[in-house]
Image (cartoon, rainbow, N blue to C red):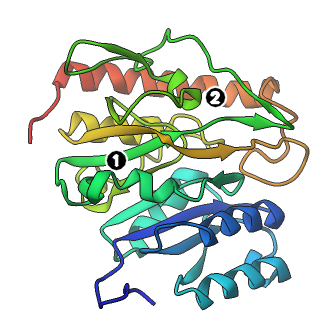
Amino acid sequence: MTVLAGGAMKPIDVCIPTKNRPTHLALALSSLYHQTYRGFDVIVVDDSATPVSTVPIIKLWSKMLADNGIKVTFYRGTGAGPQSAHNVSLHKTRKEWLLRFDDDCYIAPNYIEKLLGPGKEFLSNQKVGAVGGSVPYVRGYDVLDTAPPDEYGKMLKQPDGTVVPYEQQTVVYNVPGAYYVTHIRSSFMYRVAAAGDVGGYPTEYSNVGHREETHFTAALHFAGYDCIVVPSAVCWHFQDYEGIGGIREGYENDDDPKLRKQQDADEKKFQEWVKGAISRGRKTR
């Protein structure tokens, strides 16, 4: 089902890449079931060893969503990381917007409604390329603090001259309204046409999911699109390393030397790309 009450087309597909953790995915799907805004369908890009669509709890949540007018479609992934999964969703979607979040995320009931902006203004504003929210990182019951703003993009100058520490936006809820950023991390909604303008997700990064979304949204920024953060839109990110699937399956934690080696290589690629983007300058729209 792709229409809303009254016959209007749904504007959003939600893309969730997943790998070998159906329990996490079930929790993510349950958060979609409880959304206050329902103008979306769901794309699951599956890199699991056994197709996740055959797992009873996933079949149950897919049916519950379908019974509420939200279609869940499953596609096989390529195993080449989140950037590849999101390029699959870009190829498959027929909607105007895609909302991405990981299978170990849980979004607040008003998350999508908040991302749309007051009166859904971000949906209709052709200059808006991407909109994200707050992404508290959780392990067990502890909300992690974020790194100090010391890398490119972490200190963001606003049009009025004020500066917002970007990395800290993930745990700052008391910033009123919305603010502009040069890139967005983790979970966000983006315009499909804008993604086409920048060639989709970059494929030169490793499969551990480091910097692919940073590069993608920064490319939107340099292409002249606005990237916006709405702090009151909350997506909890659990980041479970205890051998329970995911794109970082096989790594013990963030300090695993093999993981760090891949992330360091990705970081170097990103920094080189940023230098080139800055030298070329930002386009205007």
Name the residue furthest right: 242
Q: Left or right: where does residue 205 sit relative to residue 144?
A: left
Which residue is disc 1 drawn over? 130
**Image quarter for residue 225?**
top left
Residue 255 located left or right of residue 193: right
**Dot label at residue 8:** none
Farthest residue toward the left? Answer: 285
Secondary structure state at the residue bearing disc 2 = helix
Residue 203, image x, y percentages: 47, 47
Q: CA distance from mark 1 to mark 2?
A: 24 Å
Sequence-first tag of 1 and 2: 1
Residue at 44 percent of width and 27 percent of height: 175
Residue at mark 2: 263
Q: Quadrant of residue 251?
A: top right
Residue 243 falls left or right of residue 237: right
| Residue 206 in view, yes or no | yes
Tell which tag, 1 or 2, sits nearer the viewer: 1
Tell me the residue at 58%/52% (across/down): 82
Q: Residues within 10 Å of mark 2 (few under 14, many from 20)?
A: many
Q: Can residue 194 be seen?
A: no
Q: Viewer-proximal residue, 180 or 274?
A: 180
| Above or below for 85 versus 56 | above
Q: Is residue 169 left or right of residue 20?
A: left
Percent of width and height locating residue 255 = 80, 23
Q: Quadrant of the C terminus?
A: top left
Crowd band around label 1 with a 10 angstrom C-alpha radius: few (<14), some (14–19), many (20+): many
* Image position, residue 214 (x, y; %): 45, 35
Vertical comparison of 261 with 140: above or below: above
Task: Name the amino acid type tagged 1.
Answer: Ala
Kind of element beneath mark 1 = strand
For image coordinates 40% across by 86% down, the residue present is 2
- Whole-percent x, y for residue 132 in the image: 44, 44
